[in-house]
Image (cartoon, rainbow, N blue to C red):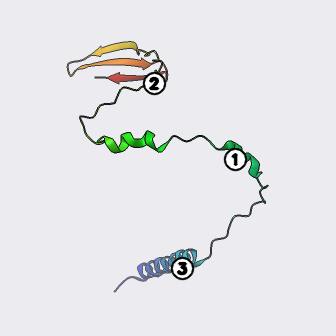
Amino acid sequence: MIPRTLAAVNLALAAVAALLVLYIGRQFVAPTSLPVGGRRAAAPTASAAAIETARSPASAYNVVASRNLFSPTRTEAPSSGVIAATPVVRPNLFGVVVRDSGSIAYLEDPTTRRVAGYR
């Protein structure tokens, strides 16, 4: 036979479990209320036409259909437009730690000011 204290604890836990099941069921059944918000001012329709951006012609996307995008041997085609080359920022060497298991170089990226160790 189960001792009375253990039976009382089991009964209390069963009651808590039943209450939690009822609470969860009530959350699923209860309708959700919509957030209350103020009315928005109507946007003028004349400005929407002025904001329309120029789109590229459909022929600009033919490169997607003509080349295999998932080929590992695919290389980028040289662009026809002249793009100004941005100067490459070289990382700063903070130091080198030499160990039996291998050396670690600590480099700082000047743009993000982040120092990382490389093996």
Q: Which residue is mark 2?
A: 81
Task: Work out which residue is located at the far left of the displayed protein and give it.
Answer: 100
In the image, residue 72 lies at what x, y percent? Answer: 24, 37
62 or 91, which lies in front?
Answer: 62
**Marks 3/1: CA–CA distance:** 54 Å
Residue type pointed to by label 2: Gly
Q: Which mark is residue 22?
A: 3
**Image side of residue 73 versus residue 105, left or right:** left
In this rendering, which labeled residue sits more in front, label 3 or label 1?
A: 1
In the image, residue 92 lies at what x, y percent? Answer: 41, 13
Q: Residue at x 49, y 79 (%)?
A: 12
Q: Is 109 above or below relative to 61?
A: above
Of the 4 image quadrants, the one containing the C terminus is top left
Q: Which residue is mark 1?
A: 49
Q: Is 93 above or below relative to 21?
A: above
Q: Earlier in the sequence, mark 3 or mark 2?
A: 3
The local crowd at label 2, few if under 14, some if 14 to 19, many if 20 or more residues have their Cα within 10 Å, is: few
